[in-house]
Image (tube, grey):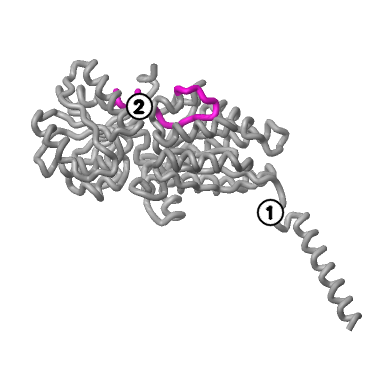
Amino acid sequence: MKKKLLFLTMATVLTTTIAMSGCAKGGNSSSNGATVKIASVSPLSGSQAAIGESIKNGAKLALTERSDEFKKLNINLQFSPQDDQADPKVGVSVAQKLIADKDVLGVVGHYNSGVAIPSSEIYKNVNLAMVSPANTAVAVTERGYEDVNRICTRDDVQGPVAADFALSDLSAKTAFVIHDKTTYGQGVADEFKKRFADKGGTVAGYEGITAGESDFSGVLNKVAQVKPDVVYFGGMYPEGSLIIKQMKEKNITAKFIGPDGMDSAEVVKIAGDSSKGVYYTTMAADVSLTDAGRAWAEKYKKEFGNQPENYAIYGYDAMNVLLDGLKKAVQDNGNKKPTQDQVTKAVRSIKGFKGVATTVTFNSKGDNEDAVMFISQFKEAKYPPSVIKTITAKDYLK
């Protein structure tokens, strides 16, 4: 019996030794190289989940494609998707969790400027690099934080572009401006209002609604009274789509113009045929307009089983920008895992990045000097809409 126990004990030791030896030689990838986590933060639940999920998926696809590239640098990439619920308080809570994990060296996000601004106040405490695919509020980069960047343009471009389009292309003389009282929605609405008035247009009304509401009879009755040429809405697609639908029901013939918050297939689902003729400005056009974009969209569909929303490609490009910065930081650090500060500096130094959707060159504020703006129109109740005009954002930047 003692011999049998001795034999079993020796066998167990031998098996354990072999297993440990196998791990040391690379049998287990998790024991080789340093772990680096890259987070995406967007609304994955609630009314804006469709866009938030697409941004997450785009970011995930980019990281997955480059995983082997980083393994050669002795870096094991891990994807860490987070749900901020389009809520500033939740965003701050997520940010606090992320900065507590020293393996997190970058964030792709957020989608809502009103969430990004307070969340980035947390990221700056450890200088954690943030590359936003979609935040347009001026204050996002005007605070001068080294770690905050965006690959899209700003509301002081987006609002004026829409105003110029209304005045010149639509020959509008009067506009009624509605906003959803959020940092993003009111910010872009104010930029439109100022430009429209400065260029000789008349602002016939200016009203705020509350995000989450569904009956906009009160404000639309005011619109019907003044009969403007255009209605400009600063806000997101859940409310904007209902406004479009209810305008049609009230026989309001004013043309509807919105910002990039209206860039979603959900517009057609909510507004139906009322979406025909609707205009919006966006940083993300239909990717199928280019050969590279079509190939990417097919790859996305194969991976996730559905067509990408336009901002999915911006999640993809934002992740690749961040990974380019990470790669440079690794190489500059003697092919060792860099610090959060080193990654932040490397990301800000990026110039001439060629993505599928956009080129990226960050200026000293973290704004993309190469950003473009598109004006799209639903010529039929079908997503994505048609791009009818392309504007270089640099022409509008101060």
Residue at the spot of label 2: 155
Relative vertical location of residue 192 with respect to residue 115 in this rendering, above or below: above
Q: Which mark is residue 173?
A: none
Mark with earlier residue (1, 2)? 1
Please give the label number shown on residue 29: 1
Is residue 145 a member of the stretch shown in magenta? yes
Q: Amino acid at mark 1?
A: Ser
Badge 2 marks a residue whose secondary structure is: helix
Badge 1: how crowded within 10 Å, few (<14), some, or many (20+)?
few
Task: Specify the farthest residue to the right.
Answer: 3
Magenta residues (range):
142-161
Dot 1 lies on which element? helix
Front: mark 1 or 2: 2
Tell me: residue 350, above or below residue 13.
Answer: above
> Picture coordinates of residue 186 (x, y %)?
30, 29
Q: Does residue 292 appear in this view?
A: no
Taking the image as drawn, is residue 180 in sight? Answer: yes
Q: Residue at x 28, y 44 (%)?
A: 212
**Position of residue 69 measured from the top left corner of the image (x, y, whole percent):** 62, 44
Asked whether residue 57 is drawn in magenta, I would say no
In this orientation, which residue lies closer to the viewer: 270 or 116?
A: 116
Q: Is residue 63 rendered to the left or right of residue 357?
A: right
Q: Quadrant of residue 180?
A: top left
Q: Is residue 224 left or right of residue 164?
A: left
Tell me the amino acid under the disc marked 2.
Asp
Is residue 278 or residue 174 the one in the foreground? 174
Q: Which image quarter: residue 55?
A: top left
Quarter placement of the C terminus: top left
| x, y percent for residue 98 | 56, 42
Q: Is residue 253 left or right of residue 344?
A: left
Q: Relative to 263, say whether 187 is above or below.
A: above
